[in-house]
Image (cartoon, rainbow, N blue to C red):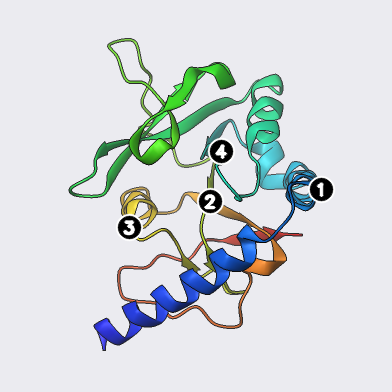
Amino acid sequence: MQKETADKKDRIRKEVLEKRNLLSVEAIEEKSSLIAEKLFGLKEYVDAENILIYASMKSEVITDGIIEHSLESGKKVFCPKCTDKNNGLMEFIQIEMLSDLKAGYMGIREPEINESSKIFLGPTEKTLVIIPGVAFDKKGNRIGYRGGYYDRFLSKYNGIMSVALAFTEQIIEVVPSEIHDIPVDMVLNA
């Protein structure tokens, strides 16, 4: 059963990524802007003191403007850093500006860790985590990139508010889920 679900997820992942990758640069920019506006209007975003957010790449919803808006709004912004790829672990490191992000694991832009780095350890209240993914359904179930990083993070920080950003091309009827999968609280799409 588990192999069957994993195979189904792989098929969906491939199909949805193909669709997403067909979007033009203009469509990605326009839709990303609409999604950012929806996010900025959310009470959970407005009230958040901590924003945990991925740095977008390729055909993902563009997050650079969201990161800059959050920093300009006086929020503490944390971006993920892969700390243990063998066990699918990451930490969120506080950044002060977009240029704090450098190409890291798999070419993903991430902050560097050094002795002065501020690592997110909580609190979960007034914190919003913005999650990437490949496919989502209306119940918040998601298919990621196959590492399990965000499921592990969300299980560690139970109760943290989570929002996924997606293009309508990434929304499907039902995402098959497994016992370790943790749905997001909300999916914003355009």
Give the mark nearer the N terminus: 2 vs 4.
4
Circle 2 crowding by C-alpha within 10 Å: few under 14, some 14–19, many from 20? many
Mark 2, residue position: 161
Task: In the rendered structure, find residue 126 and report the number of the disc placed on it.
Answer: 4
121 or 136: nearer the eye? 136
Circle 4 crowding by C-alpha within 10 Å: few under 14, some 14–19, many from 20? some
Per the image, label 1 sits on a secondary structure element best described as: helix
> Is 172 situated above or below 189?
below
Q: Mark 2 vs mark 4: give the one in front.
A: 2
Decide if residue 180 is on the left or right side of residue 136. left
Q: Residue furthest top?
A: 116
Give the mark nearer the N terminus: 3 vs 2.
3
Q: Mark 1 vs mark 2: give the one in front.
A: 1
Decide if residue 11 is on the left or right side of residue 169. left
* Callout 3 touching callout 2 (CB < 8 Å): no
Residue 135 place in picture, x, y as percent: 54, 67
Give the mark nearer the N terminus: 4 vs 1.
1
Tell me which amino acid carries mark 4: Lys
Mark 1, residue position: 30
* Callout 2 touching callout 4 (CB < 8 Å): no
> Is 15 situated above or below 118?
below
Identify the residue shown where x is 44% and y is 78%: 11
